[in-house]
Image (cartoon, rainbow, N blue to C red):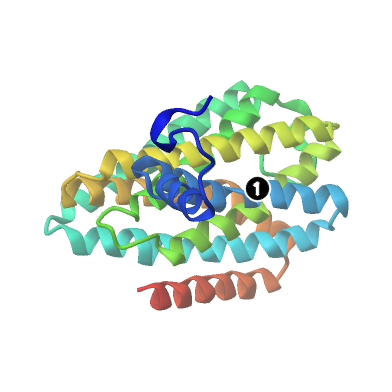
Amino acid sequence: MRAAGGVGRRRGPAARTADRALIWSNVPVEGFWWGLLGSSSLLLGAGIVLVRPLSQRVVGLVMAFGAGILISAVAYDLVEDAAESTDGGWVLLVGLTAGASAFFVGDLLIDRRGGQGRKRSTGEQAQGSGGAIALGTVLDGVPESVVLGATLVGGGGISVAMLAAVFLSNLPEAMSATAGLRQAGTSRARLFLLWGGTTLVSAVAAGVGYAALGSASAATVALVQAFAAGALLTMLVDTMIPEAAEFAGPVGGLMTVLGFAAAFGLSQVGG
């Protein structure tokens, strides 16, 4: 029997649409959804390689393009914003140093546990540890996801440039690592488990970034932006740029500039 007053009746399309909108806009949930979208390219990149394996040159070219995108995002969406939102240059310097140091130490520990060469397309992962490779993959993706969620702070909406940077830079990273892991003998099921788990963790990190920084001061947000910038720059030089330089050839520099210009254009449109 249905309850009195119409309680228990099926809700109409308008009510269900309103419910979905409420779920999407709920404060850390919105960050989660945007983080999920940005990191979903990890699964896309892995799928591309599994369906049609690409040459190392193509992977290197895509990696060079992604490196250019991230360099632009660091310069214009992280460092510039951090510098403009706080009067003290020390905040920027402390954040950059802390982010670079944190990634360096974390990456060093993961390498010693068998996670070295995790983004290589040459199959070096065969000598490594699956758990360490998974942890290293998460380490690479969390800083940018936290900052992606933080761009929602202030109610101005998601940063299109940062979203594009996260999405497009994740794509070549997943392609390169998947190519190497396949050569190392990793099964398709384990690959999708790896990238699916990393995608989920990155989405949660974006939601946490939104929720944790929603009421933070401008100096705190700037510090987090600078921290992420330091971590991302260190990650670029450690994982993406060597792969691009080795396999893309002389054209790699042009692809990097193209990626930089594309991200810069998006930052101007989004701004």
Image location of residue 123, percent across then percent down: 80, 39
Residue 195 in view here: yes
Image location of residue 184, percent across then percent down: 83, 34
Image location of residue 105, percent across then percent down: 44, 31
Vertical arrangement, residue 259 with respect to residue 35, above or below: below
> Could you say whether the residue bearing mark 1 is in a helix, strand or loop?
helix
Image location of residue 236, percent across then percent down: 53, 52
Q: Amino acid at mark 1?
A: Leu
Q: Nearer the viewer, residue 36 or 192?
A: 36
Q: How many marks on residues?
A: 1
Which residue is depicted at the point 30% across and 45% down? Answer: 224
Q: Is residue 81 left or right of residue 235?
A: left
Which residue is depicted at the point 42% across and 42% down? Answer: 29
Which residue is depicted at the point 49% across and 70% down? Answer: 263
Vertical arrangement, residue 111 with respect to residue 229, above or below: above
- Residue at image mark 1: 42
Q: Nearer the viewer, residue 84 or 41?
A: 41
Q: Which image quarter: residue 79? A: bottom left
